[in-house]
Image (cartoon, rainbow, N blue to C red):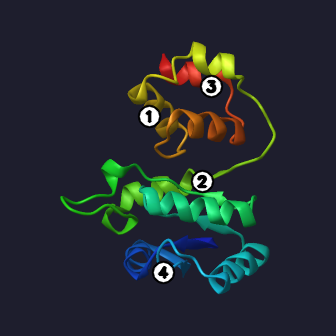
């Protein structure tokens, strides 16, 4: 069983249970998208001690939690899983993903850096990433950035310091 050094921030006990099935890890559960100050304090303390990996569900609530944590702890690592890899007929979430998909997501963590522009707006437009959601999804999945609208994709690609050349390789 693989040991994960960082604390993994998840939404609930089912996510914790699923991860502990496959990994030797510790988690902090947010208890949903209304994250309390106490939970944010615990997450910040864990980030200072061991580092954290934010691994929330690929849905609106998960993105909300991710943004809250990123505001407070910009250096946090983020793991993303595609919605198609983490769903049942009625639900979507980390707890529904298989071992290989969870492992791949955790191995492909990214840390977002503010203010570094490796990709210009013009490059983003030239690559066709504004109007083509499927093309954008192909790129964001290749770099493990989660599903994004155009504005978020542009921001995350820059924060992850992805260059035009790296995107062109994915699109070839």
Please tell me which residue lies in front, 3 or 126. 126
Please tell me which residue lies in front, 141 or 102. 141
- Who comes first in sequence, dot 3 or dot 1? 1
Which label sits in the foreground, 3 or 1?
Answer: 1
> How far, Cα to Cα, is label 2 from label 3?
17 Å
Secondary structure of the residue carrying numbered label 4: loop
Residue annotated with mark 4? 31
Residue annotated with mark 2? 109
- Who comes first in sequence, dot 2 or dot 1? 2
Q: Quadrant of residue 94?
A: bottom left
- Who comes first in sequence, dot 4 or dot 3? 4
- Who comes first in sequence, dot 4 or dot 1? 4
Secondary structure of the residue carrying numbered label 1: helix
> How far, Cα to Cα, is label 4 from label 1?
28 Å
- Who comes first in sequence, dot 4 or dot 2? 4
Residue 13 percent coordinates (x, y):
41, 82
Residue 111 percent coordinates (x, y):
69, 52
Residue annotated with mark 1? 137
CB atoms of marks 3 and 1 within 8 Å: no
Q: Quadrant of residue 168?
A: top right
Which label sits in the foreground, 4 or 3?
Answer: 4
Residue annotated with mark 3? 166
């Amino acid at each position: 069983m693989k040991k994960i050094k960082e604390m993994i921030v998840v939404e609930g006990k089912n996510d914790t249970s699923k991860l502990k099935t496959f990994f030797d890890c510790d988690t902090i559960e947010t208890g949903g998208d209304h994250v309390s100050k106490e939970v944010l304090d615990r997450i910040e303390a864990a980030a200072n001690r061991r580092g954290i990996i934010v691994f929330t569900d690929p849905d609106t609530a998960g993105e909300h939690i991710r943004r809250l944590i990123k505001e407070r702890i910009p250096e946090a690592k983020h793991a993303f899983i595609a919605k198609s890899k983490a769903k049942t007929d009625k639900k979507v979430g980390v707890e529904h993903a298989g071992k290989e998909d969870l492992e791949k997501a955790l191995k492909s963590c990214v840390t977002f850096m503010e203010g570094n522009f490796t990709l210009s707006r013009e490059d983003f437009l030239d690559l066709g990433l504004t109007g083509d959601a499927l093309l954008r999804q192909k790129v964001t999945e290749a770099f493990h950035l989660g599903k994004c609208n155009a504005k978020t994709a542009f921001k995350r690609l820059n924060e992850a310091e992805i260059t035009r050349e790296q995107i062109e390789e994915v699109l070839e």
